[in-house]
Image: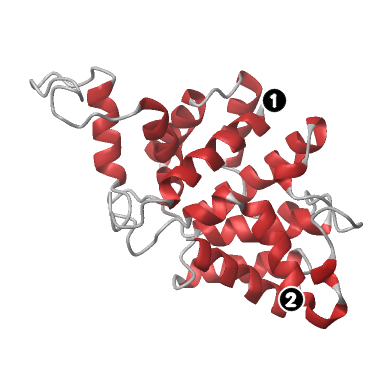
Amino acid sequence: MNASKILQQLMQQAGGQSGNKSSGGVDVKGMLEGLSRQLGGGSSGQGSAADSGLNLDMKSLLGGGALGLLVGSKRGRKLGGKALKYGAVAAVGMLAWKAWQNSQGAKGAAGQSAGSSAEGKPVEALEGEYQERRSLELLQAMIMAARADGHIDAQERELLAQQIDALGADDELHRWVERQLTAPLDAEALARQADSPQAAREMYLISVAVVDEQNPMERAWLDQLATALKLQPELTAELERQAKQAG
């Protein structure tokens, strides 16, 4: 599989989106309509994206589409109220490490550099098969978090798979994504995928980046995941704080 390639592209796209906080959220429906126009779809005389003055960048649109669909709904609502915390996605590893340092406080963690202990390395510092494994863990966490409120229907599952394919997913990863979109939501099973304490922190942080903590179903999922990952309350609070600041 090429999960690390997909995650890196999503992180890069999130990094670009996090620099623009004035838009009030991403309109998933409009984004998909723009994608259709840019690809030449639609026969109602709308013309191309360039003709309509949208000037959309394909890679940016596809990355935003995949991220947007993770938090979109079948009602096509904007993400202002349920805003994807792009900054948390873009720097998930370093933010998770920083949260751990802050939660340790006087215990001395703040003096350690990222990845210098048995805690595990941030995803951004991993290579090869280790990066691939962590990438799968984080993609799985994102998908499960996005499904926690039950708003991804069959059509959106198909669209999300198409968006990830457009980012370059190979056949094996495509099949894996399809399985994740229909698999039972199981926090314990997800937590067992974490290969280190740092991985557990990243899985929780990226889940926070996807959900709306004010939604009872999504809040319940975060609480289940924190318990399954064996994260202490002070650490989960700091991870959530880091996600909000980066959003």
Give the spatial CA distance, label 2 vs label 1: 35 Å
- Sort mark 1 into few (<14), some (14-19) or many (20+) by Cα contacts within 10 Å: some
Of the two numbered discs 2 and 1 on the same chain, state the one appearing first in sequence. Answer: 1
Give the image location of residue 226, x and y in percent.
69, 68
Badge 2 element: helix
Which residue appears at 30% of the width and 35% of the height?
Answer: 32
Quadrant in which residue 102 is drawn: bottom right
Q: What residue type is labelled 1?
A: Met
Compare residues 185 and 23 and report the one nearer the observer.
Answer: 23
Q: Residue 229 carries which label?
A: none
Look at the picture and state if 165 lies above or below 22: above
- Sort mark 2 into few (<14), some (14-19) or many (20+) by Cα contacts within 10 Å: many
Assess whether mark 1 and mark 2 are in contact (beta carbons under 8 angstroms).
no
* Mark 2 or 1: the one toward you: 2
Give the image location of residue 35, x and y in percent.
29, 29
Q: Mark 1 = which residue?
A: 1
> The N terminus is located in which quarter?
top right
Residue 187, visible in the rendered structure:
no
Which residue appears at 48% of the width and 73% of the height?
Answer: 216
Compare residues 38 and 125 and report the one nearer the observer.
Answer: 125
Give the image location of residue 153, x and y in percent.
41, 44
Which residue appears at 78% of the width and 34% of the height?
Answer: 127
Q: Which mark is residue 103?
A: 2
Q: What residue type is labelled 2?
A: Ser
